[in-house]
Image (cartoon, grey):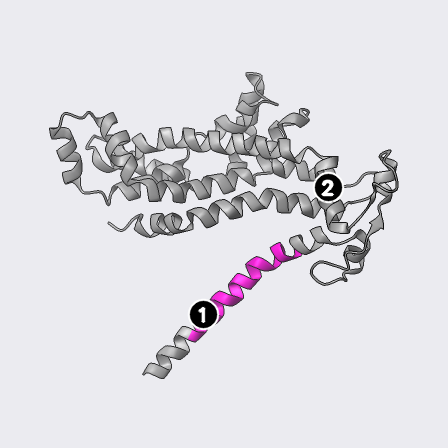
Amino acid sequence: MKNNQYIGEGWKHAILIIGALVVLLPFYMVVSISLKSQQEIQSISGGLIGAQEVQTFPVCTKMGMSEKTCTMKPYVYNYWFAFKKAPIARYLLNGLFVTVSIFLIQILIALPCAYALSKLRFYGREFIFSMVLFCLLIPVHAIALPLYVMLAKVGLVDTYAALIIPWTISVFGIFLMRQFFMTVPDELIDAARMDGMGEYSIVWKVMLPTAIPALLAFAIFSVVAHWNDYFWPRIVITGNRDLFTPPLGIREFRGGVDSDEFGPMMASIVTITVPLVVAFIIAQKRFIEGITMTGMK
């Protein structure tokens, strides 16, 4: 019996390891390419980091720089040129502003809605919740054109508002928080009402502190989705380069007289991915706690 149990556990771990390798392999390739020279990238050689031989890069000299300044190791060139060709720092700040703004407004809307759908009794509550579930099935691509037309009519195209406003109501956030609030004892809310607290005070002073794990879980989903979003910014940001988000900034490494710069392109991808990885590592424990506790009741 124990042998069969060990074999079963071994298969589970083997499948998880294979799945992890499949997920990590593309990121391994991105990091590897960001460290290599263009010749090593094209010939698919050099291992993980390449030979790292000091060389002179012709692209630098075409930019008016001296040959001595343009002599460097490939990984230095890739990351230097990533910030030189495109204002990656500006794109990172744009992405931070857009994702944080969307998340904060989503929370302001999702928490009261979730509280009403989970703890208040009113006519039509179940129908409204069913509409929330129905909205989860609507793909963003299906509503992209009507959203763009509405934003264009009010003159919001090529603005931060165009990047933020369409996503301020998150039905997934409402659903997730509602499921978490269902696990909160009603006695806690009744005690708050007996102390004279109103419903809005209960939402922000009682329910919000208890929902921190679920909020962190939702934050990971929301931030990752909008930080990596290329589809919507590509539609509404058409002429203002200063409003580019990180995924849009990567487009600047495609084509041109010097052909594709794959090394700097991958270096920019690593640069915009690292903040998400660091944020997830910091919030990993709370994220898992929020996912496992949601929907227990």
The residue labelled by disc 2 is 80
The region drawn magenta spans: 10-29
The mark nearer the N terminus, 1 or 2, is 1
The residue labelled by disc 1 is 13
Identify which residue, 270 or 185, lies in the foreground. 270
Q: Is residue 146 visible?
A: no
Q: Residue at x 71, y 34 (%)?
A: 86
Q: Secondary structure at mark 2?
A: helix
**Mark 2 surroundings within 10 Å by alpha-carbon count, few (fewer than 14), some (14 through 19), many (20 or more):** some
Q: Is residue 24 inside the magenta stretch?
A: yes
In percent of width and height, residue 190 lies at 14, 34
Mark 1 vs mark 2, CA separation in Å: 40 Å
In percent of width and height, residue 265 lies at 71, 45
Q: Is residue 131 left or right of residue 256?
A: left
In percent of width and height, residue 120 lies at 21, 33
Q: Is residue 153 above or below residue 146?
A: above
Q: Residue at x 41, y 37 (%)?
A: 135
